[in-house]
Image (tube, rainbow, N blue to C red):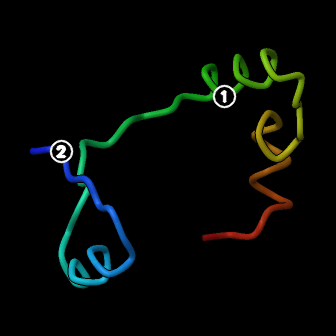
Amino acid sequence: MEKLIINSYEEFEKLLGQRIGVSDWLEVPQERINQFADATLDHQWIHVDVERAKTESFPL
């Protein structure tokens, strides 16, 4: 995909309804999330406690 540069709101508005910035999916395994939590010292349970997140977070 060619790089798209948008220089103003008006240019952006002209793209309404078009697909832009489409890329492949990136799988983020739990281990990677845990490593990020370690690196940032952010061990919020919603990210690192899988079982609690399954039972206490809002279902999608």
Residue nearest the viewer, comparing 45 with 56: 45
* Residue under label 2: 3
Q: Is residue 37 left or right of residue 26?
A: right
In the displayed structure, does residue 40 sit left or right of residue 34?
A: right
Instruction: Write down the quadrant of residue 43 in the picture.
Output: top right
Identify which residue is drawn at 60% across, 70% down: 60
Query: Disc 1 to disc 2, how far (Cα)?
Result: 29 Å
Circle nearer the N terminus (1, 2): 2
The percent coordinates of residue 35 (x first, y second) are 70, 16
**Residue 27 placed where, x, y %?**
42, 34
Identify residue type, mark 2: Lys
Front in this rendered view, residue 36 or 19:
19
Q: Position of residue 42 (x, y in %)?
A: 87, 30
Res 33 label: 1
Q: 31 above or below 28?
A: above
Q: Quadrant of residue 47?
A: top right
Q: Where's the N terminus, which quadrant?
A: top left
SS at mark 2? Answer: loop
In the orientation shown, which residue stands out farthest toward the left? 2
Q: Residue at x 82, y 23 (%)?
A: 40
Q: Which residue type carries mark 1?
A: Ile
| Front label number (1 vs 2) | 2
**In the figure, 35 relative to 48: above or below?**
above
Q: CB of mark 1 within 8 Å of CB of mark 2? A: no
Number of marks in picture? 2
Instruction: Tell me the tag on residue 19.
Output: none
Residue beneath the point at 32% across and 43% down = 25
Q: Secondary structure at mark 1?
A: helix
Badge 2: how crowded within 10 Å, few (<14), some, or many (20+)? few
Task: Tell me what residue is drawn at x 89 percent, y 22 percent.
Answer: 41
Q: Residues within 10 Å of mark 1 (few under 14, many from 20)?
A: some
